[in-house]
Image (cartoon, rainbow, N blue to C red):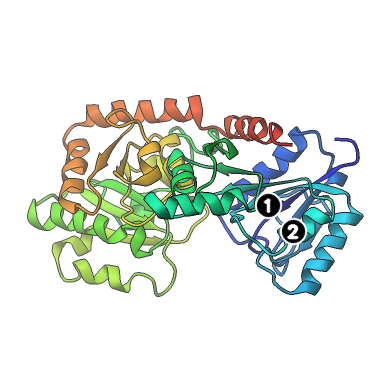
Amino acid sequence: MKNESILVLLQFGTNIGYAIAPLETTFYNMAKSLGFEDVNIHFSYRDTEKGHPASLPDSFQNVIAFDSKATNNNDITSFCNYIKNNNIKYIFGFDLPAKRKFYKPVRESGVEKIISYYGAPMSSINTGLKLFLKKLEMKFNRYAPDHYVFESNAMRETAVNGRGVEVAKTSVVNLGVDQIKYSPSIDNEIDIYKSFSIPNDRKIIFYSGHMQKRKGVHILIKAIKELVNTRGRTDIHLLIFGNKEGETEWLEEIYRQTQAENHITFGGYRDDLHMIMPKCYIGIIASNGWDSFPRSAIEMQACGLPLIVSHFQGLTETIEANETGMLFRVGDFKDLADKIEVFLNDQNIRSSFSTAARKRVERSYTLSTQLENLVKSVREIL
């Protein structure tokens, strides 16, 4: 796009781990697809202490450090000088809110459009006078982002009916996954039963994510405890990933010294989950606090796992209810246990959901589809 430049502004350091890396690559490919050459593409991170971003090409050089929450005038001035020197006209930022101190200075330095990509809910829902005042605040906010991109309709709802953002200034672009990497037919030598000391006659239930209470791991564990201790099931095993040292004690207390203790395994933080998921039976996301449109939901379905999720926020959009997955009442571990048993008791239902889940990803949730939709959305704004 002539000599104009675009800057992708991220509010975290380089190489922070699994969840964000695919988005970094997608944002880079978005800029390329919009017609920018490498010399006119820039990436900004809160810090670069962990080195060059592994998600970007080794030859890519335009990486700087800037904290988007900066309030120090010298830091903002230095950032504005970079904007001017590189003729940056567009900023595409991750989770940029309605207000930041640097918005006015960068616009005065030549930035024409600011686009914010949201990977989380923007606000709680408001009504009446409070929502009216929020809308007024947004209307007279001259320097706020020009457009907001959300990963789910539920997230957009929190902006429109929570923060007062005009719906015309929003769009929804669902996540995508690499359907080759995440596949039901992946061939590898990992024997998850042997690797995690799980008896071969058990069906493995998969979860991957954070251990915070809002993610509902305790609800999932209570459902397994219900199935094993109360309903006498011996044919299941819960395999949990994403836990770090010191994060599981409060969860282990739920089932310690009960029969369920032999049916739950914490697998830690791993980067080979795409080779483990296809060998599991079903996947579950039991969030009971805010949740968006977690990438893990699409990864599991891409690997052919039927998915059971809370009837909650953006999670309802991750499945086609009663076709690729099931919904259960938020926080109700007995309802979750009931839904698990549907799949345990009927292999044909599981197989039908598995096939439908994979086809849905191939149809609507690939990386190429995500990129195409993101480019279309951003191009309309620039």
Report the residue at 50% width, 38% height from top: 182
x%, y% of residue 33? 74, 33
Work out whether mark 1 precedes mark 2 in sequence or the reverse, and give the earlier one.
2
Along the viewing direction, whichever of 251 and 289 lies nearer the viewer = 289
Residue 125: in sight, yes or no? no
Report the residue at 86% width, 59% height from top: 82
Task: Identify residue for label 2.
Answer: 104
x%, y% of residue 274? 48, 44
x%, y% of residue 364? 50, 28
Viewport quadrant of the C terminus: top right
SS at badge 1: loop
Left or right? Give the position of 214 relative to 237. Answer: right
Q: Quadrant of residue 18?
A: bottom right
Residue type indicated by callout 1: Arg
Task: Confirm or deny contact between disc 1 and disc 2 (CB under 8 A).
Answer: yes
Along the viewing direction, whichever of 229 and 316 lies nearer the viewer = 316
Q: Quadrant of residue 173?
A: top right
Task: Identify residue for label 1.
Answer: 142
